[in-house]
Amino acid sequence: MRVKTILFWLLLLGLPMAIRAQAPITLNLQKVLEGLSGPVVLTHAGDGSNRLFIVEQPGNVRVVRNGKLKPYPFLDVTSKVAPISPYYSEMGLLGLAFHPKYKQNGRFYVYFSAPREKTGTDHQGILAEYQVSPFDPDMADFTTQRIILTVDQPASNHNGGALAFGPDGYLYLGLGDGGGAGDRFGLTGNGQNLNTLLGKILRIDVDRGEPYAIPDDNPFARGGGRPEIWAYGLRNPWRFAFAPDGRLFCADVGQNKWEEINLIEKGGNYGWRLKEGNQCYNPEKNCEQGKTLEAPIHVYMHSSSRVCVVGGYVCRNRNMPALYGKFVFADWKGAVMTLEQNGQRWESSNLRFRSGDAYGYINSLGEDEQGQIYLLTQTQLGPKNRTGAVYLIVK
């Protein structure tokens, strides 16, 4: 009788029956750093130096070399970032990715919020290229800035900003739907509008063209939409990452009921604003309207402890057998979870830590050159206080 009741609610709520909850995994956390301001990205340069690069939302990229935080920033764009509230803001320096040939060419890319240049907009998002200093490998050459792309943003929130180079060598950028609530832009919302870059995953070639070229196999390279678009129908893709096998995992923040994890495919329509998670959103009925919408591989409902999904990484560190091969992600309110594919099913687990959850809010996850996974946290709201910390997940 209990099994029938569970199946009834799964069907009623539209949850994929392929998802199964597994027993919690218990591990430890090791504090690596503290005293940071709004840490939102942790990554590496892929150059064998084993350095960590940490993005602070107000506009700095910091370097950790041999376990120690350098006293000066790798890059400081605080003067270029639009003013952000010290109490809460979704603007700032939001993305960082190093060129696959960074060791040879010293090029890297950032995405940040800049002051508006057009009336009727809130601010503009900027994708920019920089180069490392020829004199100090732990400092960028600020004068080498090259603007790759600007995007007018109608509101201050849902900016996305995740950056990553794919196995194909192209640069991917995630952009939110433009902000506000409910994607109330135009007749269909920005997420479904193929004539805007908002609510999309973009894919561009930064090694050709000026300032970039369109890969020939992009789904709209020959028309039908903006040629930069790789996938669409996203609300606020807050972090994505490529797995070792090349699959692109993306966490898309929901409106007020459902959070979701997607596998991003070429030309895929991930439903927003037609759907939130697996449920119709706008319109409330017949939301597919003859469209083929990609279903998330995992959804979870809002609760008092889970309100905003934070994307993560497929663990490639064989020294962590409890996590190896699993997608590790989190919720902003502190929950950490995993997903593992078992045939056609995706099985979820909660990840618990023996030290508890005193780390507070989780802004993002990070990964180093060895495939170790980190939590980027802060205990107080606001991007400018110095309660930000970095924790390494260990056995």
Image (cartoon, helix red, strand yellow):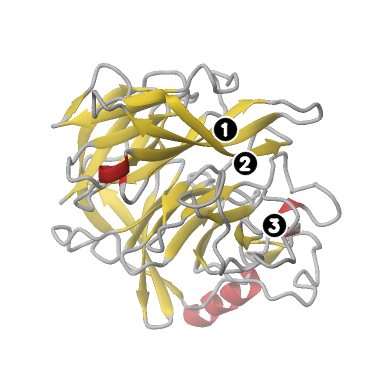
Q: Looking at the image, which is closer to me, 162 or 252?
A: 162
Report the mark closest to the observer, 1 or 3. 3
Point 60% across, 22% down: residue: 82
- Dot 2 amino acid type: His
Residue 19 position (above or below residue 58): below
The quadrant in which residue 136 appears is top left
- Dot 3 amino acid type: Arg
Percent x, y for residue 233?
A: 66, 60
**Residue 243 visible from this viewpoint:** yes
Report the mark closest to the observer, 2 or 3. 3
Whichever of callouts 2 and 3 sits on the residue coming sooner in the sequence is 2
Real-space Cα distance between discs 1 and 2?
Answer: 7 Å
Q: Is mark 1 on a helix, strand or loop?
A: loop
Number of labelled discs?
3
Q: What element carries label 3?
A: loop
Point 25% across, 44% down: residue: 103
Q: Name the residue under label 2.
A: 158
Callout 1–callout 2 Cβ contact below 8 Å: yes
Percent x, y for residue 325?
A: 27, 66
Q: Name the residue under label 3.
A: 226
Real-space Cα distance between discs 2 and 3?
Answer: 20 Å
Whichever of callouts 1 and 2 sits on the residue coming sooner in the sequence is 1
Q: Is residue 70 left or right of residue 359?
A: left
Q: Mark 1 points at which residue?
A: 90
- Dot 1 amino acid type: Glu
Real-space Cα distance between discs 1 and 3?
Answer: 25 Å
